[in-house]
Image (spheres, rainbow, N blue to C red):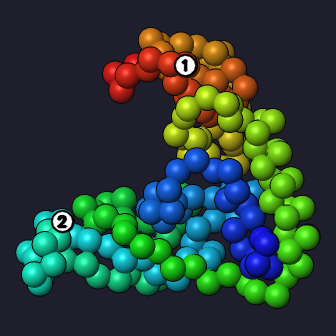
């Protein structure tokens, strides 16, 4: 935003990694990773070593079209490939102050409507459009339900938060 580059305003404050965003085509507020991702570099850990770098597996580049993006999905989810780099093409020449307003607004919305103060992995379930997963979970009366240290957030039901000692089993 400070550099006047438009495209990823929707992503501000989303927990996770760029590699994870590429794998699951992360998105919010009408934008998604696929809209701006040019390519990813991946390692295939099962392939034989191509050179003497000491890195197991072979590295290759996959273009946006090769990733077959769909709603919260890419071909990377159906593979053993590991994302090690990603290239984005953003739109230059935008007003940094306007972009900062948008990113600040998105972050403010996220921190007031989501359990931002608790550790979580972000939204857990895909939205079965046109419905929203959080609304369905809330309608089932599960908001605030806890098993061990894992809790369906009382703030936003599509977040499972770690209240301090959650285990994978929880």
| Residue 142 appears in view | yes
Check the picture and name the quadrant holding the C terminus.
top left
Q: Which residue is mark 2?
A: 45
Residue 67 visible within the image = no
Above or below: residue 74 compared with residue 127: below
The numbered mark at residue 163 is: 1
Dot 1 alpha-carbon crowd within 10 angstroms: few under 14, some 14 to 19, many 20 or more = some
Q: Quote the CA–CA distance across marks 1 and 2.
A: 35 Å
Q: Is residue 93 left or right of residue 46?
A: right
Q: Would residue 11 appear left or right of 101 to someone viewing this image?
A: left
- The disc placed on residue 106 is none
Give the image location of residue 56, x and y in percent: 14, 68
**Picture quadrant where residue 127 is located:** top right
Quadrant where the N terminus lies? bottom right
Identity of the residue drawn at 56% across and 27% down = 161
Identify the residue at horizontal 81%, vertical 36% (top origin): 112
- Identified at 52% across, 51% down, the residue is 16
Mark earlier in primary sequence (1, 2): 2
> Which structural element holds mark 1?
loop
Kindly indicate the quadrant of the structure image that contains residue 142.
top right
């Amino acid at each position: 935003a400070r550099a006047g580059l438009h495209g990823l305003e929707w992503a501000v404050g989303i927990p996770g990694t760029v590699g994870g965003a590429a794998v699951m085509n992360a998105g919010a507020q009408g934008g998604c990773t696929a809209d701006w991702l040019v390519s990813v570099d991946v390692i295939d850990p099962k392939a034989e070593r191509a050179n003497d770098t000491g890195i197991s597996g072979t590295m290759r580049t996959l273009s946006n079209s090769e990733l077959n993006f769909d709603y919260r999905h890419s071909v990377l989810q159906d593979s053993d490939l590991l994302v090690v780099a990603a290239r984005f093409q953003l739109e230059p020449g935008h007003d940094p102050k306007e972009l900062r307003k948008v990113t600040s607004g998105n972050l403010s919305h996220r921190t007031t409507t989501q359990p931002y103060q608790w550790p979580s992995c972000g939204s857990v379930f895909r939205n079965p459009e046109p419905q929203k997963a959080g609304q369905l979970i809330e309608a089932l009366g599960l908001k605030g339900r806890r098993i061990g240290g894992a809790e369906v957030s009382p703030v936003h039901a599509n977040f499972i938060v770690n209240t301090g000692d959650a285990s994978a089993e929880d």
